[in-house]
Amino acid sequence: MNAFKVIFYNCVILMLLFFIVELSLRQLFPNYHYYYRTHPQQANFDELLAKTDTNWVEANQDLGWVCQQKVNLAFPSPPRRGVHYKINSQGFRNSFDFRNSLSTDQKRVLLIGDSFLFNIYLSENETTTNYLQNEKGTDYLFYNMAVPAWGIDQMYLAYQKYVNLVQPDQVIFVFVDEDFLRSMDALFYACGEKPCFKIEDNDLQINEDPPMLWEHLCWHNQIGNRMLRAYYEQKSAELAQFMFEEIIVNEKKAQRNPAFIRIPALVDLQNAEAREVFSMEKLMKKHEVNYLELYDTLAALPEEIYSSYYILDDGHLSESGAELLGDYILEWVE
């Protein structure tokens, strides 16, 4: 009986401490963004899928989504209006069709990324790709294979789908930290359904596993949700490392040296949050490939300087930020 009382009282104390800490966190972080992983078996999956943004999204069976082939892509809450986009028949921001570009003698550089490389909200003459093309001239042809809201997994799938078609002389990946966690989802809000993977028996497998019971318990409290986010940040980093390593091995077999650039989001610089879990430095050193993390470089600058590389009230790259990214890429273009 005494042992039962001890256990009971300890449980009560733990519950009280939990509620005190939880209440404190909610007071300190009222705008905390709760994380949860989407999966095909969740009850509201079809409801979320029906909310796909049809103003710019073109569903793609292999990649999840690409862009519609029109100039007036209506992205949500644009900080700049009247921006026109040139989208080719594959759904990427290029003025040429990939299938019609192989007859030239130009060196082909394949750039793969998300909205930061897509240069959302920037005009055609302000993009990183345009900057690179102007700097290198007609001897080179730069392919922009970047789509807003893509995760690392979709970049991997795009590489697998198009690398043999494009036959690039060089492949460069550009990504931000949010791209890692996106790989955990089977649906990205307003964009649609996408493939989702897990590592099983040292191989990539389609992940259709529903969230575990403990995940459900972590969805609506900050204590548990912070642990849940940390868990999936680690899992997503492991998944990205697996995919990147496969890409590197394939590129080495093709006698190409790939390159990877990790760009910090503006909010990461403002909050001094480097998020080391997403660093791929050890992997890149292991395979001796070009890799750059811009967090330390930008964080060392005064805020008014590094902020100029981003669109205010949005966080994507500004024109000067697109040029800065282009300058780093030029260091590797052979």
Image (cartoon, rainbow, N blue to C red):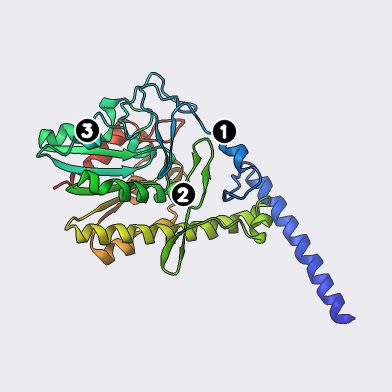
Q: Residue at x 84, y 71 (%)?
A: 8
Residue 171 percent location from the top left of the image: 24, 49
Image side of residue 39 versus residue 261, left or right = right
Amino acid, disc 1: Lys
Question: Mark 1 packing: few (<14 Cα in 10 Å), some, or many (20+)?
Answer: few
Q: Residue at x 16, y 31 (%)?
A: 134
Q: Residue at x 23, y 37 (%)?
A: 99
* Circles 1 and 2 in contact, beta carbons < 8 Å: no
Q: Secondary structure at mark 3?
A: helix
Q: Give the Cα separation between the discs numbered 1 and 3.
A: 35 Å
Residue behind mark 1: 51
Occupied quadrant, residue 60 = top left
Residue 195's disc number: 2
Amino acid, disc 2: Pro
Residue behind mark 3: 131
| Foreground of the two, 57 or 304 | 57
